[in-house]
Structure formats: C-alpha cells, structure tokens
Image (tube, helix red, strand yellow):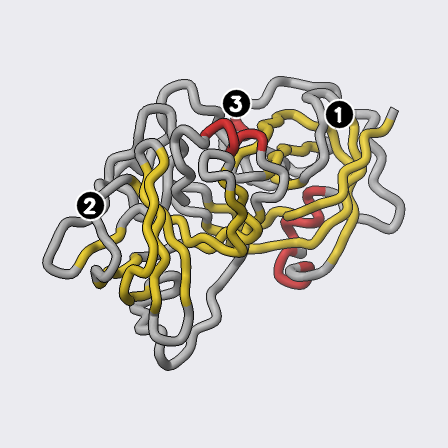
Amino acid sequence: MLIPCTEYTDYMNLKNFLFAIGLIATANLAMADEGTFSGKVTETTNVSSYTYVCVDTGSNKLWAATTEFPVKTGDKVTVHGGMPMANFYSKGLGRKFDTVYFTGKITVEGGAESAPALPPGHPPVPGSASPTLPPNHPSISTPSETPKMDLSNIKPAEGGQTIKQIYAGQAKLAGTTISVRGKVVKYNSMILGKNWLHLQDGTGSAANDNNDLTVTTDASAAVGDTVLVSGKVSTNRDFGAGYKYSVMIEDAKVTVEK
C-alpha cells in the first residue's frame, strides 16, 4: 500500500485508516486480479512525491495513488494490484476519500508508469521493487526479537483461548470472535493505520512458532502490559512485503489490565 510520503506523518497518526479486504467486481471492471482495473483519468493531483488519479472504469469512478508519475486527464491507465483503503483522509490534500486503491504500479497506455522505487523511510508496498523495510523502520513481524518476560502469572481469559490453542484450532476459529489474555512483548503504533501488538502468554513455543500472536487494534498499549484482547480471528493473511500470518486477530478491542 502506498501512502503519500509527506503524508507519512498522516499515515503514522491516522486513526481512520482501515484495511478493506477485497473489491466488488463488475463485468465492466476489466480486472486481471483483485484491485487491478483500467479506465480513463477524470481527475489527477500530486502531493509531494505521489500522484492520485480518479479512474473512470465505465461503471465506477475509483481513486488510486502511487509514486509520482506523469499523467493527465483523459489518459487511459491501469492500476495494478491496488489495495483498497476505506475512509482515507489525506492531510496534505485536505480531503477525505471513501476509498483509495494504494498500489506500487500504475501504467499509462502509450506512456510512462509510476516509479517502483519508494521514497526514503516509506513503508513497503505490495508490487513495489523495494519489498524490504527501509532502515530504522519498525518491524511488525519478527517475534524472535521480543524481550524475555515473566509470563508465569498470565491466566487464560475466562471462556477464552490460550495462544497455543488459537494456533492449534485456527481452522475452526477463523472468522469467529474470541478472547485471549497475554502480555505485550512488542508494540508498534500506526503501522498500516493500526497499532500492532505481539502477545505471549507462556503457552506454545518459539520452536513450534505457536507462542506469539499478532493483534491489530486502534487501542494503545505498552510493552510489558498485560491485556485482555477480544476480536475476530483471521487466518492466512498476507499484507505483502513479507507480512504473512497464519493466524492473527484484527481490529481487536484491547483492555489493559492493572
């Protein structure tokens, strides 16, 4: 997902930046895959190193954004592998979009295409030529780096699951709402519009890769907090750039326990 560079601050502070999974396809939306569509540009605007285009597909007008590239009203473009972001507010443009498809590549028929390289310090995006995190960018997927903590006093949530049980039962739990108690061993704020928590509760093991659970939320927490999490289980989630999770909890309600 491509978030405008001077709006990186927007990106880090954004509260309404939501993951939208999927795209409603119609017969007139010539799509090679989900998030790929073509049409004529009816409006375009730049902010810093990024270009926004409104694409008329013939049945819908869809906004897309990527690294800055030459394009004008009337050009026919193809948006490749865009990821829809609902309720996206651009502080740089002073405008809220119902949905913007962020992508690493937009091509212009008979012309140029968006540059695949990301600006310095920008998070990686699907389809980009720079799929690794830039220097000093926080990681959201390396539980092996988490500090050692005392997890002996973590009690399972009443009527809930332990982290080991979630991994073991992920096929049946997918799509259901569960609760789990654990200690925050890693916390990154406003990555892809959400706060990312890594939880451990003393069950499972690093060797079996079933002791660390990733949670996304709008709530805040700190490393070392014991939290009660309630949310829907997602499985086989792939956000691109190597961020793949066999199981996680998304958009969770998180309560810090004293």
Q: Position of residue 232 (x, y in %)?
A: 69, 54
Q: CA distance from mark 2 to mark 1?
A: 54 Å
Please tell me whether residue 192 is drawn above or below residue 112 in the rendered image: above
Q: How many marks?
A: 3
- As helix, strand or loop, the secondary structure at mark 1 comes to loop
Q: CA distance from mark 2 to mark 3?
A: 42 Å
The numbered mark, 1 or 3, whose residue comes first in the sequence reads 3
Label 2 crowd (10 A; few <14 / some 14-19 / many >=20)? few
The kind of residue on which mark 1 rests is Leu
Q: As drawn, is 117 to the left or to the right of 211?
A: left
Front-lying residue, 179 or 124: 124
- As helix, strand or loop, the secondary structure at mark 2 comes to loop
The quadrant holding residue 125 is top left
Who's the residue at 85% across and 29% down the image? 257
Q: Given the current orientation, which residue lies at the most extreme left position?
A: 110
Front-lying residue, 124 or 145: 124
- Name the residue carrying label 3: 145
Please tell me whether residue 152 is drawn above or below residue 228 in the rendered image: above
Front-lying residue, 43 or 169: 43
The kind of residue on which mark 3 rests is Glu
Disc ID at residue 11: none
Q: As drawn, is 224 to the left or to the right of 94?
A: right
Q: Quadrant of the C terminus?
A: top right
Who's the residue at 10% across and 59% down the image? 110
Please tell me whether residue 230 is drawn above or below residue 4 in the rendered image: below
- Name the residue carrying label 1: 151
Please tell me whether residue 109 is drawn above or below residue 127 in the rendered image: below
Q: Position of residue 87 (x, y in %)?
A: 57, 50
Q: Position of residue 13 (x, y in %)?
A: 58, 30
The kind of residue on which mark 2 rests is Pro
